[in-house]
Image (cartoon, grey):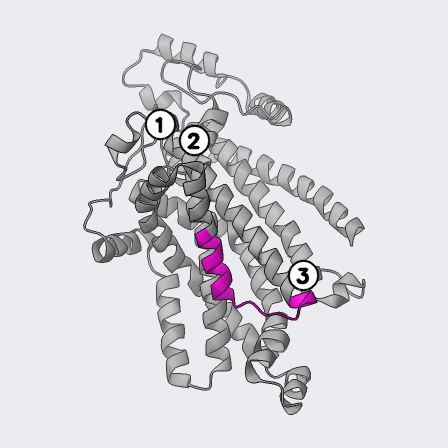
Amino acid sequence: MIRYLVKQALLSLVKLFVFVTIMFFLIQIMMPGDFVDQFSLTMNQRERDALREELGLNLPIWQRYLRWMGQILRLDFGESFSILGSGGPPVSAILKTVIPPTLLVFCTGTALAFLIGLWLGKVTAWSQQRVVSGIVTLGSLALFTSFPPWMAWLVTQIFSRQEQFTLVGGSARGLANLPFPGLDRELWRDSPISPDVIAFRMFLTLLIATVLFVAIKALAQRYLRLRIPGLVVILLIAASAVGSWYVMGTEKMSLDIVNSAWIALVTYTIISFGETMLIMRSSMTDVMQEEYVNTAKAKGLPSHIVRERHAARNALLPVLSRLVISLPYLTTGIVIVESALNWPGIGTALWNSLYWQNMPVVMAILLIVGVLSLFARLVLDVLAAYLDPRIRHGEEKPIAI
């Protein structure tokens, strides 16, 4: 199994190289003009030529590609474009600012959407009440296919009286200082810590608490035969994360960011859980016809044990596979939601960078999306081996995507 994971990791690097190469040439070829053309009305031809030379836009495309790939190999994303020349903020500084807000909303929302969809799909497939199952399925499908900006507006109108719904066009200079909407200015006026740093700490506390309590749940079930309900685990994760904010003394700022982020989080969760629910329901329906499920029922095992240990466990593999495949498309959803709600994450930064043709920032964000997708594939291989004993014993390969 370790040999296979190493092989997959090396193959993932090759896929990442191909992905980045294709995206670079597609963006450079398909997008009309370049960054300097955005300011052609305010500069004369001599000034435009000088700026194009300073930014390296006068070089052939293959030289720009080799130059950019060399920077990536050195873990140097370069500097973003600026109307004043190459003196824009470093791309790494922009990424440090916009990644934490996206992690807080995207990772948390994806986890919540996955859990909600998993539970709904499992329950509706197992339940014999077709009316309730049909209503839940129709509602999930409607939410999944809804237009994200419309859903963002609807959530804002229903749950909040604050005017947080805005459509923004972007700023050429403001990528490194995108504001969090709705923050308490008095609270942050003299704070030595910026909101993006607090957002990153909040994400880390959630991640650590999740790993800890999921591990405790698995160990308790394996060695103590003690089944901890999933809802209890979620509440423990939330309580531990909030408690850590009080321990670090950042509870007021963290809660202020929660107040700023919850509309984006709710919107993204609502438009994301439907796909997981539909796939889980279909997978559970197929698994329920298998002989081992009928055998478990014939032995007189309780219904919830048959559902959880025999049916849902095996139905989970296709859902995980689809989740990994969908990650790049889920990032598309977060781009639209962030842009609609003016949330200062990579979605807003990508939108603004495309608007201004700030290619160093665009390529860096696409590289992060590619790395995230490939890493999720490796995680899927590990989870598939854990859920399917045949993979651990080498009887068949992990799921191919």
User: Residue drawn at (27%, 16%), measured in percent from left and top?
Assistant: 42
Q: Is residue 46 left or right of residue 315?
A: left
Quick one: quadrant of the C terminus? bottom right
Rate crowding at label 3 as few (under 14), some (14 to 19) or many (20 or more) other CA atoms within 10 Å: many
Identify the residue under disc 2.
Answer: 97
For marks 1 and 3, the one nearer the N-term is 1
Element on which disc 3 rests: helix
Q: Would you place residue 250 above or below residue 58 in this image?
A: below
Real-space CA distance between mark 2 and mark 1, rounded to the nearest whole angstrom: 8 Å
Real-space CA distance between mark 1 and mark 3, rounded to the nearest whole angstrom: 41 Å
Residue 266 point in image, percent of width and height: 35, 55
Real-space CA distance between mark 3 and mark 2, rounded to the nearest whole angstrom: 34 Å
Q: Which mark is residue 78?
A: none
Of residues 245 and 348, the one nearer the viewer is: 245
Which segment is the magenta one?
A: 221-239
For marks 2 and 1, the one nearer the N-term is 2
Confirm or deny contact between disc 2 and disc 1 (CB under 8 A).
yes
Residue 61 visible in the picture: yes
**Helix, strand or loop for the magenta stretch, by majority:** helix
**What amino acid type should be assigned to the residue bearing mark 2?**
Thr
**What amino acid type should be assigned to the residue bearing mark 3?**
Ala
**What amino acid type should be assigned to the residue bearing mark 1?**
Asn
Q: Is residue 145 left or right of residue 9?
A: left
User: Residue drawn at (44%, 47%), measured in percent from left and top?
Assistant: 243
- Which residue is most to the front? 247
Identify the residue under disc 3.
Answer: 384
Identify the residue under disc 1.
Answer: 177
Q: Would you place residue 7 above or below residue 184 in this image?
A: below
Quick one: quadrant of the N terminus? bottom right
